[in-house]
Amino acid sequence: MAYSSNNSDVKNIVMSIVRYGYTDDNRVFIDTEKLRNIIGQTERSNFIAILKSHLQRFRVSSDCRDVDLVVQAKICPDFSSGCNDVYCQMFHICKFYLLSDMCQAKSCRFGHNMHDGGHNENLLRSLDLELLSDGELRGIFRLTSNRTEWTTPKICFLYNGEGCKSMDNTCKMLHICRFYVYGTCRRGDECDKNHDAQHLQGVLRKYGFDTRRTSQDTLMNLRSLYQMFGKRKNDKSTAADHQIPISQNDTNTRAAPRKASRSVSRQRENKPRNGSAGIQVQQNAIKNGPIKCAGPLMAIPPNAAMVRPIGITDPRLPQTEARKFNFMPIGIPGNPTPDAEENGGVETKQTPQKAARKSRQREHQPKNIPQGKSDEVPNICLFHLRGKCWYKKCKNVHSRMLYQWQYEDNQGKWQDFAEETNIDIEKNYCSSDINDEHYYKTTEGSTRIVKRIDFTNFEKSDPKIRRLSTLSFTSDTSNLDLPFTTKWIWYWKSEDGWIPYGEQDGIGYKASITSTEIEKSYLNDTDVTVEFKTLGHAYLIKFFDMVQVNKNIGTERKLARRPEFVDKTVLKQRKDKVKLMKEAEKLATPSTWEFSGDVSSHFRMTRLLACSAEYTEIRDKFLLDISQSEEKFVVRSIDRIENVELWRAFLEAKAALNRKLKRPIEDIRLYHGTDINIVDAIARQGFDCRLAGTRVGTKFGKGGYFAKTSHFSNRYCNKDDKERKMFVARALLGDSIMGHPSYARPPLKDPSNPSSDLYDSCVDNMVNPMIFVLFNNNQVYPEYIITYRPI
C-alpha cells in the first residue's frame, strides 16, 4: 500500500508513539516495525522515508530499528506571575496538575485544561499533540529535555544553611545535602545532611518523578537536570517558597533525622559605591564553626534576565533553554562557570568580585542589552519617546522623560514619583558634587513628612526606591537614538573634588581615558579592571571597588558613575535639533519611493503592481526558494515599506560599520517569517531585537533571527492563517561569528581586551550560514511584506 504523509498522518504517528511506545527520563520512542504495523503501512522503506522527512518531529536511529518523538513542550515559568507575552510558546497551566495530577487546590487559578480552545490547544496543535489525553501528555512534560527550573524541584537553601524551619511536610524544596547531589560531599556518613532520595518522595512525586526507582537513580536524574541548568545563574529561594504544603498525605515523608546541623550561613554585605546606588555586593562568609560538608560555596545573584528573540520561529524545532536556574554552585566539575556562558562555552577564571559585579549591574544598572524578566528593572521605551510605540503590550515603561524614579509601596508594588519630584531627585543624583543622599517631602495621612533617599544604596532608602532609565549611550549609538539614550559620566575624586574623566583638575592633570571609553568597558562586562596611562603614570580602574589605583605608587582614588542631567527643556531642544537635521538633510532614499509631504516623517505602505519589474524580482526569488517546501504557494501581494526614520537609521548603521571595519559593507536581503498581528508594528518601528526568544528560542543568540531562504522562514509563519506574511529585509552583517545560546550581544573580537570591538552578527554555520542573528535594530530594515497563501 502506498503511503504519503499529511498533517493528520503525522499527528496519528505521534499519538501511536506515545500511546504504544516507551517513555523514560530522556526519550519517548517505539520500535519502527511495531509502529509500522499500528499505522498500517506495508512498505518499510517508504515508511522510514516518511519518518525521516519530518525531522522536526521524528528521529530515526541509524539502524532504523527505533524512532524517537522529537517535541519541545514546556510549562511557562512566567505564567504564575502573569505572562503577558502574546507569542509565548510555552503552556499556561498548573504545573502540579500536568506533571503529577497532584494539585491540591479546590479551584486552581492556574487551570487544569490543556484542550481549552485557546492558547494551550493552539500549542498542542502546532506540536501535533492535540490527539493525546492529559495523562499521555504528562510523560512528555516529564522528559529531561522539557523540564525547566520551574518544573524541577529546587534544593532547599535554608536546609543546607542554618536550617529550614518549615521542615519536610511544608517545604516544597528538597531537604538533601547539595554537595552529595553534585558528588562533592567529603563527609560521607559523617555528614549531618540527608543523603537518601527516598526521604524526598513527597516533593518528587508532586513534580512527576518516578519514586519507585532506587535512590541512586533518582539522584543521578537530579544531578543531570542541575547540570543541564548549570550555566544559568542562581536564584536564592525566598521564605515564601518554604510555606506551601506538598500534600496532606505527605506528612510521613519527612527525612530521617541525622546529626544536629552545624550551620554554614552566607552573609551578604551591602558595600556602598559612589555612583552605583542600590548595587549590592555579595560576599560569602563562613561562621559558626567548622564546615561539615566540604565543597563549593553557593553564589546567589539576583534573577538574571531572559531576553527572547523575534523572528523565524517554530515550536516544533528544539530550542535551547535560556532561563536561569535557581540552585547551582559555581565551579562544580563538569559544569561551565557563568563566564563560559559568555565566552561560547570556554571556561575562564571568574573571581567572586567579578560574579558579584555582574549580578549588581544586572540588578540596577541600565544596559544596552535589555533585560526581560518581570522582576528586573525595565528600560524606558525609546519608541514612546520618539513619538509613538506601536507594540500593544510593550514590556518597557512609557515615560515622558529619559528617567523615572519609583518607590515601593506597602504592597510591594513600584509607584512613580510625581513629575516635579522625579526631576528634582534626578537633578540631585546627577550633580557633579556626587551627593550621597536626597531628601523630599511627602504626605502620610494628614501629616507632611520628610523622606530620605540613599544614593549609595537604593534599598536602604525609606521607602525602597529605584531608577528606570533609557539604554546607555555608547560610541555606536545612532543619531536617531542619540537624544533619548542615557549618557553616563565617570568621575574620579581629587583634592579639589570630583573630576570627570577627560577633563583637567585644579593643577592641570587630565586623564587620557574618557567617560565614553570607560562606559564601553563597563557595559562589555567582561573584566573587572581597565588600565590607562597619563603623564608617565599607569593607572588601574577597578569596577568592583569603584577605585582608581596608581600602579606606580599604590595610591587610590574613589570613582563615581552618574548620568548626565536632562530636564524637559533640554529634551525638547534635542528633539527639535534632530527634527531640523532631518529636514535639512537630503536623504538618499530609493528612487522608487513616492513622497507626498514631510520627507523626514514619511511613512507609507505601497502596493506594488504585479506587472512591475520590482514586483517580479521579489516574487520570483521568493517562489524559487519556497519551492523546496512540500506545499505549493501563490503570492497575493507585495507591499513596499517606505519609512524614512528607519531608512535613515539603517544608512547611519551602514556608515558606522564602514568606518569601524575600514571597508565598504554591502547589505543583503534576508527573510523573516512573522505573525500577522505584529506586521504593522514592525513596518512602523522596525525589528526589535530585544524581544529575542518570543518565537524562535535562543540557539544562536538572544537577538533577531533572519533566514537566507523563504523556504526556511516559511516554517515559522502561522500555518493556521489562510494568508501568511513574510518580510524581506535588508541586513548589514559585518563581521560574523558562530552563535551561542548565551550571547545577548556578539562577543568581543579580542576577549583579553574589554575595550575591543564586538563582532557584528552571529550565524548558525561559519561555512554555509542559513540563519543570521542581529542584535542592533538599526542593522536591519524591513523592505517588503509578501502576502501569500498555500494552494
Image: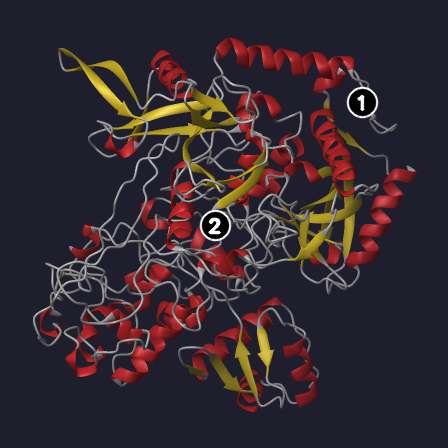
Residue type, label 1: Leu
Give the image quarter of residue 53: bottom right
Q: Determine the residue positioned at 54% across, 44% down.
A: 524
Q: Determine the residue positioned at 46% across, 35% down.
A: 366
- Per the image, the residue denoted by label 1 is 587
Left or right for 450, reference 762: left
Give the image quarter of residue 423: top left
Judged from the image, the secondary structure of the residue bearing numbered disc 2 is: loop
Check residue 387 in the rendering and tell me which mark sits there, or answer none.
none
**Which image quadrant: the C terminus?**
bottom right
**Which image quadrant: the N terminus?**
bottom right
The answer to whether one can see residue 710 in this image is yes
Q: Residues within 10 Å of mark 1 (few under 14, many from 20)?
A: some
Comparing labels 2 and 1, the label whose residue is closer to the camera: 1
Left or right for 484, reference 147: right
Q: How is the image coloured?
A: secondary structure
Q: Earlier in the sequence, mark 2 or mark 1?
A: 2
Residue type, label 2: Cys
- In this rendering, the answer to whether 465 lies above or below 698 is above
Q: Nearer the viewer, residue 345 or 398?
A: 345
Give the image quarter of residue 462: top left
- Residue 201, percent from left and from top: 20, 75
Left or right for 79, reference 384: left
The answer to whether one can see residue 142 in this image is no
